[in-house]
Image: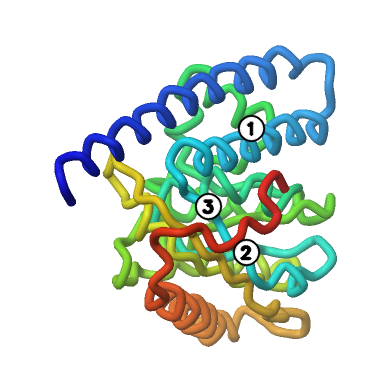
Amino acid sequence: MSDGAWVKGWLRSATFFSLFVVGITLFGLGITLAWPVTNVAQRRRLASLWSAYSRRLLAVTCDLHERIEGMENLPPPPYVILAKHQSAWETVAFVSLFYPCVQVLKQSLTWIPVFGWALKATHQIAIDRGRGVAALHRLHEQGTDQLAQHVAVLIFPEGTRSAPGTTGKYHPGGVSLALAAGAPIVPVAHNAGLFWPRRTFLKRPGTIRVTIGPPIPTEGLSRADRKALVQKVEETIESMTRTLEAIPSAGTPEGNATVGG
């Protein structure tokens, strides 16, 4: 990358970051202030608007767009979304893409002023991974409650972000939840790590591609099927991810389906 291109990229990323923080602050405060006088569905709608704002902001400031394929594969709610985790992008974009849904996230995120308050106000599922079995019990309890209300549950089975071309350990919590609730699993792959890498400030222009795979049914299956189901989910997501990573999609935007959710 030339010095001029690096400076341009840095300025674009800095502009995005500044306005992204403004968005978190304004929407976060709005959701928090609305907490006593609104229901959770209304507060989640505000969170979805923040997500849509952030997606549009990324396109305008960093020339980073998105292409969504497979929306027709989404079954009627409820369902459990198990998605690849490469970037901060999916934690933001999926809030509006899969609305209404709740994310399973680290409990420490709820301790962040304003942002954490909004997470609590929208009833995200916050777990302390260090508590082992207790964390799984919390996931099952709150996850089945949300599914019963026809709200999708979004889980990143790798737990932490993995670099493009690598695969983290797929944890069974999401599959166990789907089995317990008899809800289908929706596998989701993307290549956001190529454009918004983990622990990196600069964003590359181009088109993030997302593939939503056909739902994997769990009805009629039991806990004895969990291991095979985890393997199937991993193979499905990783296969779709490798296909996306092989597509040279940096540069000219190639469509912007469902932005704004």
Q: Is residue 255 above or below residue 175?
A: above
Picture quarter containing residue 27? Answer: top right
Residue at numbered disc 1: 50
| Residue sitting nearer the eye, 75 or 205 | 205
In the rendering, at what x and y percent does residue 118 appear?
A: 61, 26
In the rendering, at what x and y percent does residue 238 appear?
A: 44, 78
Which element carries disc 3, helix, strand or loop?
strand
Q: Amino acid at mark 3?
A: His
x 56%, y 48%: residue: 104
Which element carries disc 2, helix, strand or loop?
strand
Give me the C-alpha separation between circle 2 and circle 1. 19 Å
Q: Which mark is residue 156?
A: none
**Which mark lies nearer to you, 3 or 1?**
3
Judge whether residue 142 can be spotted in this image: no
Residue at numbered disc 3: 65
- Determine crowd level at label 2: few under 14, some 14-19, many 20+ residues with C-alpha closer than 10 A: some
Q: Is residue 57 left or right of residue 167?
A: right
**Which mark lies nearer to you, 3 or 2?**
3
